[in-house]
Amino acid sequence: MADIALRPVTRDNWLEAIALKGSEDQQAFVPSVAVSLAKVYIKPDGERVEYLPFAVYAGETMVGFVMHAFEPGTSDSYWINGFLIDAAHQRRGYGTAAMDRMIAFIRERAPACREIRLTVHLDNAAAERLYARFGFRRTGQIWGDERVMSLREDEPALASGIGPRE
């Protein structure tokens, strides 16, 4: 698995972050980084939801973006959203490594978390396959043109280092 780090998006790296773009065929599936960053301020999911935007780094090179949204004090309101690897850096294992790290971050930071959720565009089969490798399963919910998937604490995941806590 590629060696990556998640670093907060700050006033020092936000311009680089908003320049990230998925491949042309993926751009309809994921909001731009600028839209994801706007959610931090706008709070479209309500005042109780907190947003943590991260840049994905391989060494000192920013290669992607992912955001964690959560409602403190809950066991099932932990989300991964806005996830993308820049087109110039795809097919190097960064997506798998970043998802692995994001799940680990949530589990380390939120011991009460029993379910992590995300949405995937109905036509984004490649992303759904990636998420399924980590144990995410369809919930049956469809929001607009996106399918809700969840990784429950009691469902072992298939990717290295991911699964129920001991």
Image: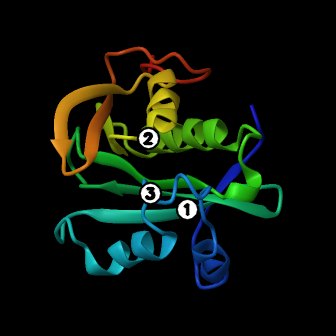
At label 3, the amino acid type is Val
Residue 27 higher or lower than 111, as above or below? below
What residue would you read off at disc 1? 54
Query: 126 or 107: nearer the eye?
Result: 126
Query: Contact (CB < 8 A) between labels 3 and 1?
Result: no
Under mark 1, the amino acid is: Phe
Mark closer to the observer (3, 1): 3
* Residue 53 percent location from the top left of the image: 48, 65
Q: CA distance from mark 3 to mark 1?
A: 15 Å
Q: Residues within 10 Å of mark 2 (few under 14, many from 20)?
A: some
Residue 112 in view of the camera: no
Pick whichever of labels 3 and 1 is earlier in the sequence. 3
Element assignment for label 1 = strand
Cα separation between marks 2 and 1? 22 Å
Q: Does residue 111 lie above or below 84 as drawn?
A: above
Q: CA distance from mark 2 to mark 3?
A: 10 Å
Residue pictured at 33% horizontal, 81% vertical? 41
The x and y percentages for residue 153 are 33, 23
Is 23 positioned to the left or the right of 43 in the image? Answer: right
Q: For the residue carrying disc 3, how many other residues have a C-alpha within 10 Å: few (<14), some (14-19), or many (20+)? A: some
Label 1 CA crowd tier, 10 Å (few <14, some 14–19, many 20+): many
User: Residue 47: which quarter of the image?
Assistant: bottom left
| Residue 30 circle label | 3
**At x 72% / y 37%, what residue is drawn?**
93
